[in-house]
């Protein structure tokens, strides 16, 4: 039996085995297919658009990557410039926004067309965030491929770094020489900041061989004195810092435990209470204070002669027109503040409602340990010793209206809070210096 087979037309009889071949025949391109030169041209015509798309997308990708890098660099620079403004006393949100806008434009230069800048300022966190967005358009794909979405964006946040505890805060906001260091005197702030709220152009003053050395010295105004009398040179135009203890209520004032008490000799132990008319300890007296609060009312706390005074966990509240302290050169004093109660962390607390300012004088040449905060919101503190003061204290903080130093003492203010069981006042947690370093956060 004879079998028959279906025959598919092939090249030998004018047919083609491929759909593509049939497609070319219908287009009348079979001659171009059989012609080598025509085949090359045809292949090039088909492949070239694909190659062009690949090349165009590669060029555009590199271009957009470059523009994105430039945009991020401009955002970084703007955030840093804005955060730097936060160091100034008169930092203003609109000024910062204008500065970040101009910084972005300046950094982008001729490529700044159509850029949009949004700025967020956090005065509490002391940080500036800058958002930058732009639609630069593609070189190739915008026209060839019809791709329109070329939007790019960048964001940067910069803040004030290097915050540190304040070991001296001088509250007077206008006085020339609110901090005045004279006659070879020196202030040594170990890992802490010395701060003046005075907006005077010479709110901090050093002269006659004096030295002010701290991790940071900051003036709301300016400073006077040779640069080598500071280490480092103070920052100026710093923001004002409110009195951190302004809302701390004073301890209660009870009835007089003693009136016009004077101790001249012998060994004595005193109890907490109200000492009306002041407290005088001098000549060769040696006095130990039991823990608690001592109210010095309407009189001076006078420690003179070669007297010795010591007390652990004690606080002194000075109230009345003449209530000040005066420690004479040959005295020996060692005191630490209470651990708890209304005077927790405060060694001396001056009545902030007194009608007159007081002068509190520290001349003792043997006062190596004063642990706690000396708070004199209405007073002038005068340091006129010839030997170092407070150098053995875990920490000492001075908050006063003004400070004057003479005769070559070295006032040492440590900040080793963890080395003492006397905690600093909780309010001091909000009294840290703004630092001087500006850094990108993210």
Image (cartoon, rainbow, N blue to C red):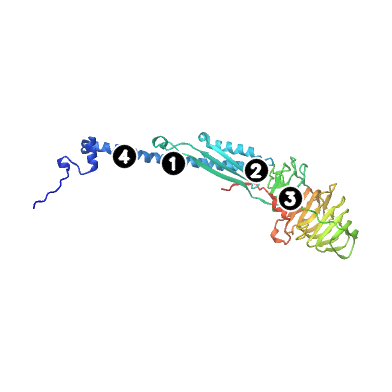
- Of badges 1 and 3, the one in the foreground is 3
Q: Position of residue 327 (x, y in %)?
A: 84, 55
Q: Which residue is mark 1?
A: 62
Marks 2/1: CA–CA distance = 37 Å
Residue 194 seen by the camera? yes
Image vertical order of residue 442 relative to residue 414, above or below: above
Image vertical order of residue 412 relative to residue 102, above or below: below
Mark 3 Cα within 10 Å, few/some/many (few <14, many 20+)?
some
Dots 4 and 2: beta carbons under 8 Å?
A: no
Q: Which residue is mark 3?
A: 244
Disc number at residue 86?
2
Q: Which residue is mark 4?
A: 47
Marks 4/2: CA–CA distance = 59 Å
- Of badges 3 and 2, the one in the foreground is 3
Name the secondary structure under disc 1: helix
Disc number at residue 235?
none
Name the secondary structure under disc 4: helix
Dots 1 and 4: beta carbons under 8 Å?
A: no
Q: Position of residue 176 (x, y in %)?
A: 77, 42
Q: Residue furthest left?
A: 1
Residue depicted at x 34% and y 38%:
49
Name the secondary structure under disc 2: loop
């Amino acid at each position: 039996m004879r079998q028959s087979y279906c025959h598919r037309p092939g090249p030998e009889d004018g047919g083609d085995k491929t759909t593509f071949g049939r497609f070319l025949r219908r287009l009348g391109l079979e001659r171009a297919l059989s012609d080598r030169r025509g085949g090359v041209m045809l292949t090039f015509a088909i492949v070239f658009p694909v190659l062009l798309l690949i090349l165009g997308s590669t060029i555009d990708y590199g271009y957009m990557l470059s523009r994105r890098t430039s945009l991020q660099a401009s955002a970084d620079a703007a955030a840093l410039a804005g955060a730097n403004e936060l160091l100034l006393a008169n930092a203003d949100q609109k000024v910062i926004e204008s500065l970040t806008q101009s910084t972005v434009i300046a950094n982008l230069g001729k490529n700044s067309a159509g850029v949009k800048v949004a700025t967020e300022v956090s005065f509490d966190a002391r940080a500036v965030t800058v958002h930058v967005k732009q639609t630069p358009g593609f070189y190739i794909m915008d026209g060839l491929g019809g791709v329109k979405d070329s939007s790019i964006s960048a964001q940067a946040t910069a803040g004030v770094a290097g915050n540190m505890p304040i070991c001296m805060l001088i509250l007077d906001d206008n006085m020339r020489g609110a901090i005045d260091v004279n006659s070879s005197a020196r202030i040594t702030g170990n890992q802490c900041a010395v701060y003046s709220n005075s907006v005077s152009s010479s709110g901090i003053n050093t002269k006659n061989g004096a030295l002010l050395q701290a991790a940071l010295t900051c003036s709301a105004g300016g400073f006077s004195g040779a640069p080598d009398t500071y280490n480092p040179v103070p920052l100026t135009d710093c923001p004002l810092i409110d009195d951190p203890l302004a809302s701390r209520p004073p301890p209660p004032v009870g009835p007089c435990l003693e009136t016009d008490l004077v101790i001249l000799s012998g060994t004595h132990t005193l109890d907490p209470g109200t000492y009306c008319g002041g407290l005088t300890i001098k000549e060769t007296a040696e006095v130990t204070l039991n823990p608690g609060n001592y109210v010095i009312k309407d009189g001076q706390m006078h420690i003179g002669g070669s007297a010795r005074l010591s007390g652990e966990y004690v606080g002194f509240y000075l109230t009345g027109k003449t209530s000040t302290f005066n420690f004479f050169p040959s005295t020996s004093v060692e005191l630490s503040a209470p651990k708890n109660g209304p005077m927790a962390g405060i060694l001396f607390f001056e009545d902030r409602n007194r009608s007159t300012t007081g002068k509190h004088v520290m001349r003792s040449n043997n006062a190596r340990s004063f642990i706690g905060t000396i708070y004199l919101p209405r007073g002038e503190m005068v340091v006129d010793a010839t030997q170092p003061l407070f150098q053995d204290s875990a920490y000492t903080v001075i908050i006063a209206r003004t400070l004057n130093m003479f005769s070559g003492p070295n006032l040492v203010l440590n900040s080793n809070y963890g080395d003492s069981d006397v905690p600093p006042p909780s309010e001091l947690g909000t009294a840290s210096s703004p630092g001087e370093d500006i850094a990108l956060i993210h």
